[in-house]
């Protein structure tokens, strides 16, 4: 990024700006976007200044509500009322976009500046074919015939790696998987060969293996077309893997801009340091996951000094009173930071506390608390009474009636000991959530056995199940929809105690207060309604609710997936603390293998309803690997630009569980497939080495051990002396 | 899809069977003796008994029912007591007129309400939206016949542009037929507009805040394309059901409106039949109206699948 003066120093009249080669492609100066409210306007993006060169990638990071998306949408002038751009310039290729008419802007949008939106599921029009949606973009900006536009659309679908583009062009969005839809969105974005792509959290809604593929695709497209990319993300891992420059946003302001390596090696703003430290490293053992304490201030009620001062460990009196500092060059000038102490502070060392000792040993000598044996859950395919029946006439002759099933969970076994956390990981659709619901008998199992303290849950009547529910609780992904919105949280929690005869009256109220305090809320929170809490706080309430009945096991179904990264660590720490205190067990379900690393003792990696690999956390992260585990682990983006892991990208997408592949379920995508044996024989989950590390694969242990480990301590890396 | 249609047709057959049961039961429980209605209050016991025997009314009820249903299956609905003609012929003559009225009214309503609803949604909370909402509120609050009377008063009495009522067959005089159609169809269409408009508006508002609308704007599409191509096609899907429902409602509304406009359709036929205890005719009318109702809802579900590619009835083909 070019060194730049303090933003409001010289407003360049856009009309006289010549679009010469030495000018950056995009130069945002003092951009300010406000939202009118009933009282006074809220400034969602304030004094934002940065520039982006042709072909470069800049990341815009920050917690949710930091103003990243508003900034991006302001650049395209796509702010809906009551929002309004009130100040600044957006100089794109020498011209100020804020001076252009709406009609001129429409010629630029999709053509010279294109957007790749966040959610592939809702960003495509469901009643138009994907072809129509690509073609209309091309025809809007290029004078080509219909058939020519169609040819170009097929070409662009080919370019983004959609197989059989020619046949699939007339399909509707719902006929594509999430990853394929994201590819369609990338194709739309690149269809008119724009100079600038604004990618707004383009991979946040995707599984980790799909995310890796989309990021690679973006990089590849960008290099081919020499497109500049503004990458908006909350994930520093994504930034580290894709960006050249980074802008860090906080409470509507850009608080630091830097080159990627500089940002990670020597952040200049304390917020950047905290943001980096809040991401747990895979190879580090933590007593407690690093967290980013506190919350971003309410935009309508900003502190009088630096916006970050209330959360800043280095804040002084000057910070709290001197107004919000402007973004200014630091050191040799390649970094800019909005911090009055930027020149004095040395933030190059991580402040996150690492663990001294290892993790707590689980005593597995006795009886397991919870045991699942050969669990099966089949859903009938199709709807209605006879919807799953299909006449088949294989091999000629009379038609035979065939019932078809989706084998959501197929022969899954594991156990959980007291005080232990067992994880179930896998991509969406692998059956992990179905396991959670089936073991609790929220769904009826099709087959198999489930024991809780020796009680056969699969055999119990509904009354006995209900009393066992006291011992086994569940926490869901979305706390907002699992808490009754019409009751104060104190009553929600109290009701659970009454139902299971734990406490009533004054004793109950006392315990509710204790519980709320235990999960890090104030006791007075009992009188508040769920909507008065933030997402992280709601999840704390949900945890308090689960703890109210003193369970021995809590099933956590993606408990942190819907939360901001900084909040995730807080919730995980809370779960760990509670476990240490009360020796509770968790069954922890997650699609994020990085999260599992720091909370689970043992992990089952699931694929297509079966367990591919099972073992202690150290076994899962080191050789030998199931090829699926290996690719899953390799796809996790590390928040460290020095580490470009050789990612193993999987071909295609997860096969349909109605028609699972023959033999090993993973054989259709396996990069290490041997041959016929994989297609014909279903591999057993067999022990490899000691302490019950089991892998379901035909490969030999040696073949599965080509890579050493994902968590081996990293050798001390050379610090680049450029700073 | 094929399976779905079969299932729906089967379902309709069952419904229709239940309708015949109810229609038969109700008309037979009604007080009033058909023979007495025909022969007048001065008829002798003997002549009443003779007429009842002739009409088959002295047989057990279940025999009468099966006889009637068997006839229905062959398209036979019996003889009208009042008119002395086959019920099927009477209905065949009147039904197209009522359909003409109801279809025209629905078309008028759709032509008015969808553009209005879209316009209101695009200008949310501004003057046009408020005006349209008020109009809708008045439209919903007033019963159909009142609209009929207002229309007669304004267009026939004050301005004398259209006749106050009556019916002319289109084969006889196309222009004359149209002239007489305008007021009743307009009045009914007006009454239906309000509801469809409100549905269109709220559906459009929901769609306009969707992510794919934001993307369409980010692709440089004009407001016109965004609204008409991207939003309307999605917004209209839930409105289809409402339109089908309103059409059925219109068909119920014709009973009153035909009376107001002297429109000799199935509505007035039903009224006459009830007044004269013409049991076969009442039954016939009930069956036909129920059938129309079912068919319009079935059509709505098929249209639904046509407009929404995500719905393909019966799972995979």
Image: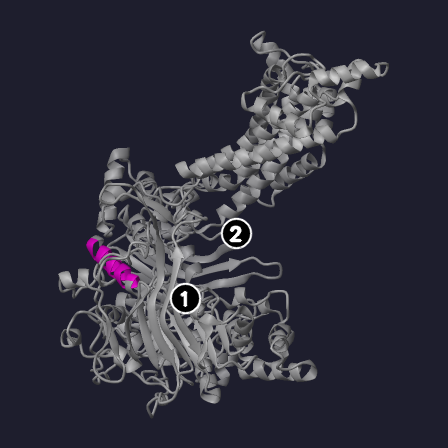
Badge count: 2
Magenta range is A210-224
Task: For the C terminus of chain A, give its image quadrant.
Answer: bottom left
Predominant secondary structure, magenta span? helix
Chain at numbered mark 2: A
Q: Which disc, if any, is residue B77?
A: none
Mark 1 or mark 2: whose residue is earlier in sequence: 2
The span from disc 1 to disc 2 (Cα, nearest Å) is 40 Å
Query: In the image, what residue occupies the spot 62% across and 61% down?
Result: A39
Q: Is residue B110 above or below residue A528?
A: above
Would residue A669 be seen by someone viewing this image from the given angle? yes
Task: For the N terminus of chain A, give its image quadrant.
Answer: bottom left
Query: In the image, what residue occupies the spot 77% across and 18% down?
Result: B49
Query: In the image, what residue occupies the spot 46% across and 73% down?
Result: A457
Q: Is residue B299 above or below residue A240?
A: above
Can you tell which quarter of the image residue B180 is in?
A: top right
Number of residues whose C-alpha sits closer than 10 Å to that of mark 1, classed few (under 14), some (14–19) or many (20 or more): many
Can you tell which quarter of the image residue A141 is in?
A: top left
Residue that sits furthest to the bottom in the current view:
A357
Q: Is residue B194 above or below residue A364?
A: above
Secondary element type, mark 1: helix
Can you tell which quarter of the image residue A313 is in?
A: bottom left
Which percent across, then down, holds residue B58? 72, 23
Secondary element type, mark 2: loop
- Would you say residue A220 sits in the magenta stretch? yes
Are the numbered discs 1 and 2 placed on the same chain, yes or no?
A: yes
Q: Which disc, if any, is residue A81?
A: 2
Mark 1 lies on residue: A433
- Would you say residue B165 sits in the magenta stretch? no
């Amino acid at each position: 990024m070019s060194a730049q003066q303090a933003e409001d120093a010289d407003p360049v009249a856009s009309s006289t700006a010549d679009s010469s080669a030495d000018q950056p492609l995009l130069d945002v100066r003092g951009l300010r976007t406000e939202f009118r409210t009933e009282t006074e306007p809220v400034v969602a993006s304030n004094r934002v200044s940065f520039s982006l060169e042709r072909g470069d990638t800049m990341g815009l990071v920050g917690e949710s509500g930091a103003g990243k998306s508003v900034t991006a949408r302001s650049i395209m002038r796509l702010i809906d009322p009551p929002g309004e751009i009130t100040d600044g310039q957006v100089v794109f290729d020498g011209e100020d976009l804020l001076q252009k008419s709406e009609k001129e802007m429409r010629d630029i949008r999709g053509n010279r500046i294109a957007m790749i939106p966040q959610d592939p599921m809702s960003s495509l029009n469901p009643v138009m074919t994907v072809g129509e949606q690509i073609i209309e973009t091309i025809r809007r900006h290029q004078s080509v015939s219909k058939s020519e536009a169609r040819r170009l659309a097929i070409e662009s679908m080919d370019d983004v790696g959609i197989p059989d583009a020619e046949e699939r062009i007339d399909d509707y969005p719902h006929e594509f998987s999430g990853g394929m839809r994201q590819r369609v969105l990338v194709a739309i974005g690149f269809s008119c060969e724009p100079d600038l792509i604004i990618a707004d959290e383009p991979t946040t809604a995707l599984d980790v293996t799909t995310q890796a593929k989309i990021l690679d695709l973006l990089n590849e497209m960008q290099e081919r077309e020499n497109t500049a990319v503004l990458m908006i993300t909350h994930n520093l891992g994504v930034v580290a893997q894709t960006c050249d420059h980074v802008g860090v946003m906080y409470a509507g302001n850009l608080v630091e801009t830097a080159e990627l390596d500089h940002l990670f090696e020597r952040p200049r703003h304390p917020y950047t340091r905290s943001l980096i430290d809040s991401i747990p490293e895979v190879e580090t053992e933590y007593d407690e996951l690093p967290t980013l304490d506190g919350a971003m201030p309410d935009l309508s009620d900003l502190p009088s000094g630096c916006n970050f001062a209330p959360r800043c460990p280095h804040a002084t009196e000057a910070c709290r009173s001197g107004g919000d500092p402007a973004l200014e060059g630091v050191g040799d000038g390649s970094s800019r930071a909005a911090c009055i102490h930027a020149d004095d502070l040395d933030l190059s060392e991580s402040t996150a506390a690492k663990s001294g000792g290892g993790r707590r040993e689980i005593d597995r000598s006795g009886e397991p608390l919870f045991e699942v044996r050969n669990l099966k859950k089949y859903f009938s395919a199709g709807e209605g009474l006879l919807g799953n029946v299909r006449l088949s006439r294989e091999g000629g002759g009379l038609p035979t009636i065939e019932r078809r099933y989706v084998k959501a969970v197929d022969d899954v076994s594991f156990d959980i000991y007291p005080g232990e956390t067992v994880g179930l990981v896998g991509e969406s659709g692998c059956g992990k959530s179905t396991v959670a619901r089936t073991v609790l008998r929220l769904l009826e199992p099709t087959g198999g056995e489930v024991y809780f303290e020796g009680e056969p849950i699969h055999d119990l009547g509904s009354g006995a199940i209900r009393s066992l529910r006291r011992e086994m609780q569940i926490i869901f992904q979305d706390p907002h929809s699992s808490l009754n919105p019409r009751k104060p949280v104190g009553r929600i929690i109290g009701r659970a105690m009454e139902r299971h005869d734990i406490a009533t009256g004054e004793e109950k109220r006392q315990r509710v207060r204790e519980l709320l305090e235990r999960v890090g809320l104030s006791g007075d929170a009992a009188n508040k309604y769920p909507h008065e809490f933030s997402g992280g706080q709601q999840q704390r309430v949900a945890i308090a609710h689960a703890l109210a009945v003193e369970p021995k096991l809590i099933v956590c179904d993606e408990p942190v997936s819907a939360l901001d990264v900084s909040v995730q660590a807080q919730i995980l720490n809370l779960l760990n603390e509670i476990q240490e205190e009360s020796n509770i067990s968790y069954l922890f379900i997650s699609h994020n293998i990085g999260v599992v690393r720091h909370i689970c003792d043992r992990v089952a990696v699931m694929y297509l309803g079966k367990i591919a690999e099972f073992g202690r956390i150290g076994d899962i992260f080191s050789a030998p690997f199931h090829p699926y585990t290996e690719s899953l682990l390799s796809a996790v983006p590390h928040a460290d630009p020095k580490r470009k892991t050789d990612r193993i990208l999987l071909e295609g997408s997860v096969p349909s569980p109605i028609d699972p592949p023959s033999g090993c379920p993973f054989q259709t995508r396996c990069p290490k497939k041997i041959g016929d044996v994989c297609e014909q024989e279903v591999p057993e989950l067999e022990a490899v080495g000691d302490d019950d590390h089991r892998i379901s694969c035909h490969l030999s242990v040696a073949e599965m051990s080509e890579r050493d480990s994902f968590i081996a301590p990293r050798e001390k890396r050379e610090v680049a002396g450029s700073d | 899809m094929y399976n779905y249609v079969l299932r729906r047709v089967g379902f309709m057959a069952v419904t229709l069977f239940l309708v015949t049961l109810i229609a038969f039961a109700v008309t037979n429980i009604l007080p009033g003796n058909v023979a007495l209605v025909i022969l007048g209050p001065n008829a002798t016991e003997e002549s009443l008994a003779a007429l009842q025997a002739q009409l088959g009314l002295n047989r057990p009820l279940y025999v009468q029912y099966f006889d009637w249903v068997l006839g229905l299956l062959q398209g036979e609905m019996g003889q009208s007591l009042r008119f002395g003609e086959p019920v099927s012929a009477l209905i065949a003559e009147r039904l197209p007129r009522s359909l003409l009225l109801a279809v025209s009214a629905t078309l008028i309503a759709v032509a008015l309400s969808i553009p209005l609803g879209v316009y209101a949604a695009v200008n949310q909370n501004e003057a046009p939206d408020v005006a349209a909402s008020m109009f809708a509120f008045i439209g919903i609050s007033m019963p159909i016949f009142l609209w009929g009377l207002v229309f007669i008063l304004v267009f026939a009495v004050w301005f004398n542009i259209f006749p106050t009522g009556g019916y002319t067959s289109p084969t006889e005089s196309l222009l004359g037929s149209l002239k007489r159609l305008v007021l009743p169809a307009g009045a009914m269409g007006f009454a239906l507009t309000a509801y469809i408009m409100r549905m269109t508006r709220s559906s459009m508002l929901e769609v306009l805040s969707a992510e794919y609308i934001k993307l369409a704007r980010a692709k440089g599409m004009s407001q016109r394309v965004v609204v008409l191509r991207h939003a309307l096609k999605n917004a209209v899907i839930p409105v289809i059901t409402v339109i089908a429902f309103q059409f059925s409602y219109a068909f119920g509304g014709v009973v009153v409106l035909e009376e107001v406009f002297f429109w000799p359709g199935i509505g007035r036929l039903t009224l006459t039949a009830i007044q004269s205890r013409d049991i076969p005719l009442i039954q016939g009318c009930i069956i036909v109206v129920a059938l129309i109702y079912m068919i319009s809802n079935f059509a709505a579900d098929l249209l639904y699948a046509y407009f929404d590619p995500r719905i393909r009835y019966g799972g995979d083909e």
